[in-house]
Image: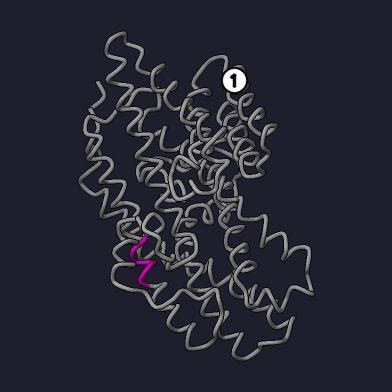
Amino acid sequence: MADLALPAAAAPRLAFVDALKAVAAQLIVLHHLAFYGPMSDQALPLLPSLISWLSQDARIAVQAFLVIGGFLATQSLAPAGVLLASQPLALVQRRYLKLVTPYLAAVLIAIACAAIARALMAHDSLPGVPTVPQIVAHALLLQSILGYEGLSAGVWYIAIDFQLFALLLGMLWLARGIGRRGDRTHVAGALLVAALALASLYHFNRHADWDIWGVYFFGAYALGVLTYWATNRKQATGWLLLIVVPVVIALLLDYRSRIALALLVAVALGLARRTGLLETWPRARLIAFLGQISYSVFLVHFPVCLVISGLFSRFAAYDPWMNLIGMIIAWLASVAAGALFYRFVESQSLRGFWRGRPASGFRQKP
């Protein structure tokens, strides 16, 4: 999820990317509201098809963030296919700090809100009382690998985003070493990324046991990477087709709706970049704002929903209409909380992070 694919602080906003992030973030909030209950359990008879779809299928919206993450990481790290960084390890450290600073603040909020919710209701959606090792594992982005329960819904994505960034950076660094022999660094980088993407699509992503590791998701992430490079070319349509064909074959062998959505997002990004819509469409301030705060909404929505679920469970436990209203209130409150979190936590941490450090880890361009 950055940042749910946050661009660098100095980069201009991309309207089309903001729109994708805005829609995907709202679907994730609604998915968690429908999946975890208890309000959705009571409201289900009123809107069975919609709530069931949100509960089961809306979660694949996270694929949009994976593709966007690869697209924007490439824009920052290697827009022409060659790694710009002279100190890759410094970039890994910066990425970790950029992700974890607001994330840890959200984890603390999640712990507090879960305690409040436990006082209001008993439900299997509630995280248990955290232990010190569990909190440390979250801080190190190792909670899934070490087998700890997540302290908030979606925290797994932050760890995966970090793994994917490190994987891409490592391959670009390796390609630069290989390319020195024949000045084919960009070719080596593209081949390495494509090879791991195919391994992910044809093997790792087909086995759920791998879903705590970045390689499981690298196929979707690499679609963003390869799409960015393909749209640098004059014959972009042909290069995009070269990306599409092996993904379609992978879907024919083993259809996965999440991969199909990732492919659609990648193609949409590619077409938007080639037509100029990436920076200019849609021109809607609300959508741009929702895209800008999407990472903050992602981080804080679940704790907010837990507290509101607890209140409605206590005072309107068996009223379907009241619980449906509660879901709507929780959705709107999540957006409001995300806006406040962005204003007072995320934007402040980014401002402090980037102040005086605009080019650390990168070679100066001539």
> Which colour style is shown?
one colour
For label 1, the crowd category at 10 Å Cα-Cα, with few meaning under 14, some 14 to 19 and many 20 or more, is few
Residue 105 within the segment the image draws in magenta: yes
Q: Quadrant of residue 311?
A: bottom right
User: Which quarter shows the C terminus?
Assistant: top left
Residues rendered magenta in the picture:
103-108
Image position of 173 with respect to 59: above or below: above
Image position of 161 with respect to 42: above or below: above
Q: Residue furthest top?
A: 182
Q: Residue at x 31, y 60 (%)?
A: 139
* Percent position of residue 231, x then y: 53, 24
Q: Quadrant of residue 352?
A: bottom left
* Percent position of residue 290, x then y: 54, 56
Question: Mark 1 is on which residue type?
Answer: Leu
Q: Residue at x 65, y 55 (%)?
A: 58
Image position of 51 with respect to 192: above or below: below
Residue 134 within the segment the image draws in magenta: no
* Percent position of residue 196, x then y: 46, 30
**61 and 336: which one is in front?**
61
47 lies left or right of 208: right
* Percent position of residue 275, x then y: 60, 27
Q: Residue furthest bottom?
A: 315
The residue tagged 1 is 242
The secondary structure making up most of the magenta span is helix
Q: Residue at x 49, y 33 (%)?
A: 222
Element at label 1:
helix
**270 and 153: which one is in front?**
153
Q: Quadrant of residue 84?
A: top left
Image position of 19 with respect to 236: above or below: below
